[in-house]
Amino acid sequence: HMCALRALNYPHVPNDVLKNVRPGQWRAGPHTDYGALTILKSGGPGLQVLAVHNNNDNDDDDDDDPNTNNTTTSSESYWVDVPYMPDNFIINIGDMMQRWTNDKWVSTLHRVVVPSPADNDNDDIGSRHDNNRRQSMAFFVNINGDAEVVPIETCVDDDHPAKYEMVTAGQYLMQKHLASMGEPSNPDDNHDDNHDDVPLLPLDEL
């Protein structure tokens, strides 16, 4: 297998520095993980995932939601805080699992935000006074490099034809690494999750 365990340390950021943080500054920028899935032991708050809501998922439900705008046809997305719960694990779906399931399961776009000064004094979210250091452990689940990754049969039918050609797991992970370094991506990888403007980051950037 090609699994990897990473120890991820986000050092303490003092309040006088936090007050000068500008929008768009993160501890880890928006990205998805490359492999099948990631098992994360979080060391504190700050992780966010992108929630995408398609306003046209079910038109029959529009009357049940007074906040629905019937004239809006595009998807809308927003960042959601992942609750910090000590002694629990977080599971992220990776890009390879999305390819395997023919986009039935979507990889988790996520980021780690810089804490606010108020977080340093908030015991309810699990922080310690005067210390917002975040120490996490991430286990990246990657299958054997010679394993063939092709959309599984139960995720393919007449209404949902296969979107991806066969590729070995090793080739796929290498393509992702090369893309993160600015090298040309595989032309056969037609994955399009409407987040092409989000840079791919190395596996240890969670």
Image (cartoon, rainbow, N blue to C red):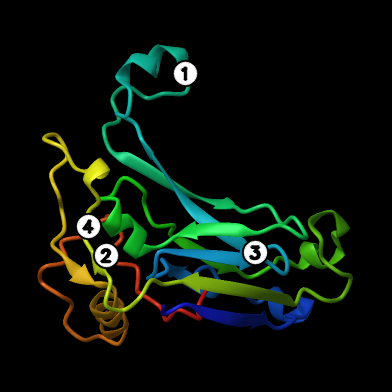
Closer to the camera: disc 4 or disc 2?
4
Percent of width and height locating residue 164: 16, 58
| Residue 141, disc | none
Mark 4, secondary structure of its residue: loop
Q: CA distance from mark 3 to mark 1?
A: 30 Å
- Label 4 is placed on what type of residue? Asp
Q: In the image, what residue occupies the spot 33% across and 14% down? A: 60
Give the mark nearest the N terminus, 4 or 1: 1
Identify whether 21 is placed above or below 84.
below
Q: In the image, what residue occupies the spot 34% across and 31% down? A: 55
Q: CA distance from mark 4 to mark 3?
A: 27 Å
| Residue 192, disc | 4
- Label 3 is placed on what type of residue? Gly
Q: CA distance from mark 4 to mark 1?
A: 30 Å
Q: Which residue is mark 3?
A: 46
Is residue 26 at least partly visible in the picture? no
Is residue 119 at least partly visible in the picture? yes
Identify whether 128 is placed above or below 170.
above
Q: Which residue is mark 2?
A: 196
Mark 3, secondary structure of its residue: loop
Closer to the camera: disc 4 or disc 1?
4
- Label 2 is placed on what type of residue? Asp
Q: Which residue is mark 1?
A: 65
Callout 4 touching callout 2 (CB < 8 Å): yes
